Amino acid sequence: MNLSFFDQFTTPSLLGIPLILISTLFPTLLFPSSNNRWIPNRYLTLQLWLIHTTTKQLMIPLDKKGHKWALILTSLMALLLTINLLGLLPYTFTPTTQLSMNMALAFPLWLATLLTGLRNQPSTSLGHLLPEGTPTLLIPALILIETTSLLIRPLALGVRLTANLTAGHLLIQLISTASTALLPIMPPVSLLTTTILLLLTILEVAVAMIQAYVFVLLLSLYLQENI
Amino acid sequence: GPLSERPLMEVRLGELHTWISTCDFSPQGLLRTVQKAWNSYYAKYINVRRGGPAGISMLLTGYCVLSYSWNYQHLSKNAFLGSL
């Protein structure tokens, strides 16, 4: 039995080289550069189709100035998707379970959207702090509330990703420990637990993809307000 | 050809230590080796006309094995579950 179920989230290191370095760089191998052929290999065709579909989808609400963000948003999405899905393989380490990494991704990007808005169109950006049509008496309270919600956005972005992935991995470990421990004692209950584990794994695959998409979608939404 | 220019698969076992002494262990040299190795793997298993899931699956399995070896010290400390 593990001393603590949180041991799976510590960064393993061998001979002083932390695994988080390799886990973060490994997705680079999974995205080969296109070689300018009319029809590349099947892997690349599939990947390019996926990337083009998501980029087009993300760029629909943005105007021409927002299209400068296409590269960073798409590459962020590809990175998060790959890291999350790779974490579901056995024995692998998921860098996005570390709050430090997610805050390092969320905070600068959110700040970039905010500063873009304040620099290029300061009145419009500040105007977002008060929704249209609020009753006059509520204005001071609402401005305070909207400012708080604005400032809490990077925290929410980072913590959402961390919490979802950490909770998922923890649940998988708990339920698999339970089903292994129950196997010699009550095999039918162990079978039931294994079915739950199977359903949970499918859920985790979905969560991994959805969380990556939500992260990037929210960033593009913050960009829309400010560009 | 000369020993330093032959790829690893064509070096005989007896000549291995001589071949290793001709290797370039600077950062750029290591990077070049890694790039060459990746490119030959990519060209042989993934960049083929009618590829399938095999090329990527081998890569992911290798990644799992690498992660296991990285975690081995910690994993080996877990008590055997039969003692519960």
Image (spheres, grey):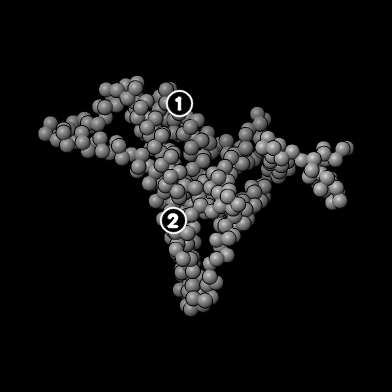
The answer as to whether the residues below labels 1 and 2 share one chain is yes
Of residues A21 and A221, the one drawn nearer to the viewer in this rendering: A21
Residue A106 visible within the image: yes
- Looking at the rendered image, the quarter that the N terminus of chain B falls into is top right
Residue picked out by circle 1: A67
- Residue at point 85% right, 47% down? B15
Identify the chain of the residue marked 2, using the numbered disc in the image: A
Give the camera-side residue of A171 and A135: A171
The type of residue carrying mark 2 is: Gly
Question: Relative to residue A64, is residue A140 depicted above or below?
Answer: below
Disc ID at residue B30:
none
Which comes before the other along the chain, label 1 or label 2?
1
| Residue B64 visible in the displayed image | no
User: How many tags in the picture?
Assistant: 2
Q: Secondary structure at mark 2?
A: helix
Where residue B48 appears, x then y in whole percent? 71, 41
Residue density around tag 2, few if under 14, some if 14–19, many if 20 or more, within 10 Å: many
Residue found 41% across the figure and 39% down from its top? A106
Callout 1: SS:
helix
**Front: mark 1 or 2:** 2
Which residue matches tag 2?
A168
Q: Is residue A57 left or right of residue A222?
A: right
